[in-house]
Amino acid sequence: MAQLSSRMQALVQPHLRTLEPYDPNFAPTRVNLSANENTYGVPARVRTAMDAALAATPTNRYPDPMSNDLRDVLAARHGLSRENVIVGNGGDELLYNLVLAFGGPGRTLVNVPPTFSEYAFFASLAQTSVVDVWRDPNTFAPREDELVEAARTANLVVLTSPNNPTGDVASADLVRRLCEACPGLVLVDEAYVEFAEQDTSAEPLLAECDNLLVLHTLSKAFALAGARCGYILAAPDVIDALAAVRQIYSVNVLTQSAALVAVERRAAFAPVVEKIVAKRGRLCASLERIGGVRVWPSQGNFLLVRVARASRIRERLRDEFSILVRDFSYAPGLADCLRITVGTPEENDAVIEALSALVLEEAANA
Ligand code: PMP
C-alpha cells in the first residue's frame, strides 16, 4: 500500500501520519458487482421526470443549504417532520459529521466489526477512540451483552442493519437496549434496509428513544449512488447539532432535484427492489451449489461468500472475465471472503458461471 511522502508525514497533523492515499482499486469492467450499487439503474419513467427536473434547475444560484423541499418529502415518507431530517452529500458525509460533532479526542465510538470500514476511518480522522466489539466469527451476529456493556461508556455507538458486508440485521430489542444503556448517541445505519424483510427498521423506536439516529441513503435502492445523497432521521436537537457542523452547500442543486423526483416517485422503485431480493435468493442458491463455497444469508443487496484462494479468484474474475467483486480477504475476521452485489439476471449468471469454473480450476491447482 502507498503511504504519504515523508515530507507530508512531517507536515500533516500527527494523528494523520499513517494514513494511506485513498485507492479504491477501481478498474472499469464489463460487470461491476463490487460496490453494492443498484445495477438496474433508475426506472425509465422516473429517469424521464428526473431529466426534466434537472433541465429546469438553475445552476447559477447556491443550493438551499438544508434541502428543505427534499427534507419535506423524506419526512412524509417516514411519517416524521422536517425537523427530524438532515440531508447530506451521501451517507458518508453524515457519518463524518457525526464524529465531528460528537466524537473527538478522549471520546469513544463503539464499532461492531466486521462492518463498513468508514466508521472507524472517520473516527480516526476526528481523533475518536474506537472500541471494537467483534461479531461472532462464524455467524457474524453481534455479541449483544458485550455490546450493551460497551455502550454504557460510549459517546457514539454505530450498528449497521443490514450489516455490510455480512448481511445480517439487528433486532429492535438490541437497538432499544443500546439506546437505554448509552449516555451518548446510537446510530443505526440502514443503508440497505429496503432490501430487508418488512419491519426490520429501527425507525419505530425513534418515538421512544431520543438518542437514536437512523441513517438512510439513496445510493442503493434508489439507484442514485452517483448523485450522492443520504439522510439521517433523529430528534430535532440532534439534527440541529449535525446541521451546525455541516458544510453549508454540500448537497448541490442537481442532487436535490434528482433526489426529490426519486423520493416522490418511490413506488416505481419497489418492483426493482423486489426483483433484486428475488435474485438474491437465486444467486445464493446457485453459489451454494458450487462445492467449497460458503454463503452467509443476507438481507442486503449483496452476498458474503467464503472460498479458498479468494484473492486469486477475485483477480482472475477481473482479469479473465471482466467481472469485479469486492475482496475482503485481508480484512480482520473476513479471511477468504468476497462480497458480491446482486445484479441483473445476466450479471448474476456471468458471475456464477465464472466463479464455478474458477473454483474448480483453483481446487485442481491447490
Ligand atoms: N453505510 C453503509 C453500510 C454503506 O455500505 C454505505 C455505502 N457503501 C454507506 C453507508 C454510504 O453510502 P453513501 O455515501 O453512498 O450514501
Image: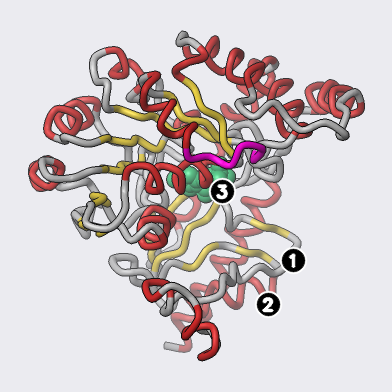
What percent of the width, then of the height, locates residue 107? Answer: 23, 52
Residue for badge 2: 319
Q: Secondary structure at mark 2?
A: helix
Q: Is residue 248 magenta?
A: yes
Of mark 3 and mark 2, the one earlier in the sequence is 3
For the record, the magenta segment spans 245-250
Residue behind mark 3? 36
In front: mark 1 or mark 2?
1
Q: Which is more toward the observer, 266 or 95?
A: 95
| Dot 1 crowding, Cα within 10 Å, few <14, some 14–19, many 20+ | few
Q: Is residue 145 left or right of residue 78?
A: left
Q: Earlier in the sequence, mark 1 or mark 2?
A: 1
Q: CA distance from mark 1 to mark 2?
A: 11 Å
* Image quadrant containing the C terminus: bottom left
Query: Which residue has dot 1 on it?
Result: 28
Report if the beta carbon of the residue with label 3 is closer than 8 angstroms to ligand 1.
Answer: yes
User: Do the CB atoms of the residues marked 1 and 2 lie less than 8 Å apart?
Assistant: no
